[in-house]
Amino acid sequence: MKRISDTTKFQILENTVVAIGKFDGFHVGHQELLDRLQHMKNKGFATVVFTFVPSPSEYFSGEKIKELSTVEEKRRIFERAGVDYLIEYPFFKDIADMEPERYIKDILVGMINAKCVVAGDDVSFGKGGKGNSQLLEDMGEKYGYATQIIDKVSYNGREISSTYVREEVRKGNMEMVKKLLGTPYHIGGEIVHGRKLGRTIGMPTVNQLPVSEKLLPPNGVYYSYVYLNGAKHSGKKYYSITNIGTKPTVDGSAMGVETYIYDFNDDVYGEDMEVFLLSYKRPEMKFNGVDELKKQMQKDIMEGRLYHGI
């Protein structure tokens, strides 16, 4: 996958099919867009995902917005999906003030060489968000592209959206999140050194420090599984149990993600890991010392084995 970032000056010469959107929290509606891209790729078009960085909502609010999918996580998703080009287009005042038709003419057609545009029926673009799915369809004949508009997907009578997913993540309802995303909610990042307390009590863990913009579920213990992306373990799935929080019994440190991987004791510091959260087990607690913490961890691990069937 070729990534085009931090520039407004580029030109794609191949005939392309382009999907446009925010793609925060890659839910089942977004997956339908990627399926359409793949269908057109099979017909000989280069596939393009176009998104803004920062997101328009973050730009206009002036505040960092907690994301379901960080920039790095999105890149991994699109690369694995076989997307040919990922465009992370800078969002700034001139872009915010651009008339919708000019956005179509200069960017989608002029720079990306779009012959087909795929978007959700709630898409908005251009000055004041005046560009919509109807305008995309209306301008197609004038600028020489076809349009595929994806209807909203619903679950239990409610449209699936990033807002819906956020609500469930904040509740810690990971089973519902999986239904909305089509896959468990995950947290990616480098494995870093912790205090190594787990190792001293016979339960070694691996630690991650999630980026500040990542939306995390409530502090607590979760049944999980992980994928390690280093050379030795790449593509391997391991069952695990994960604590999200500040380790109040130890030192009340910065927010972290600490995972115990069953029957695993390799040195993986510096490798990238993705933790997939399956189910909330219990809240994070402060114990009366390390012995009490160890006893609870042993209980959590035993119950985790039963949950995973291992």
Image: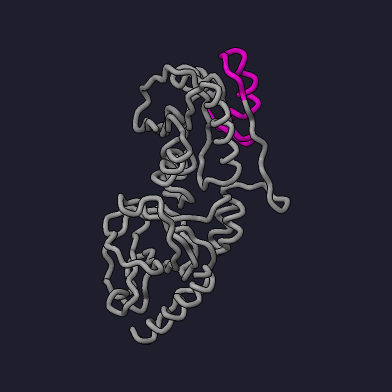
In the displayed structure, 46 sits above or below 185; it is above
Task: Please give the name of the residue rendered at 58% of the width and 59% of the height, measured from the top-left corner.
Answer: 168
Range of the magenta residues? Answer: 119-147
Viewer-side residue, 148 vs 124: 148
> Quarter-wise, where is residue 6 in the image?
top left
Task: Please give the name of the residue rendered at 44% of the width and 66% of the height, measured from the top-left corner.
Answer: 240
Q: Residue furthest right?
A: 157
Task: Please give the name of the residue rendered at 30% of the width and 54% of the height, measured from the top-left corner.
Answer: 271
Left/right of residue 24 with respect to residue 266 in the rendered view: right
In the displayed structure, 9 sits above or below 217; it is above
Whether the magenta-drawn stretch holds residue 234 is answered as: no
> Quarter-wise, where is residue 36 in the image?
top right
Whether the magenta-drawn stretch holds residue 132 is answered as: yes
How is the structure coloured here? one colour
Residue 127 visible, this orientation: no
Residue 139 position in % (x across, y down): 61, 18
Task: State the quadrant of the N terminus.
Answer: top left
Viewer-side residue, 297 vs 267: 267
Residue 195 position in % (x across, y down): 27, 71
Residue 35 position in % (x across, y down): 57, 35
Left/right of residue 126 with respect to residue 151 in the rendered view: left
Viewer-side residue, 86 vs 161: 86
Task: Please give the name of the residue rendered at 36% of the width and 33% of the height, measured from the top-left corner.
Answer: 5
Residue 11 visible, this orientation: yes
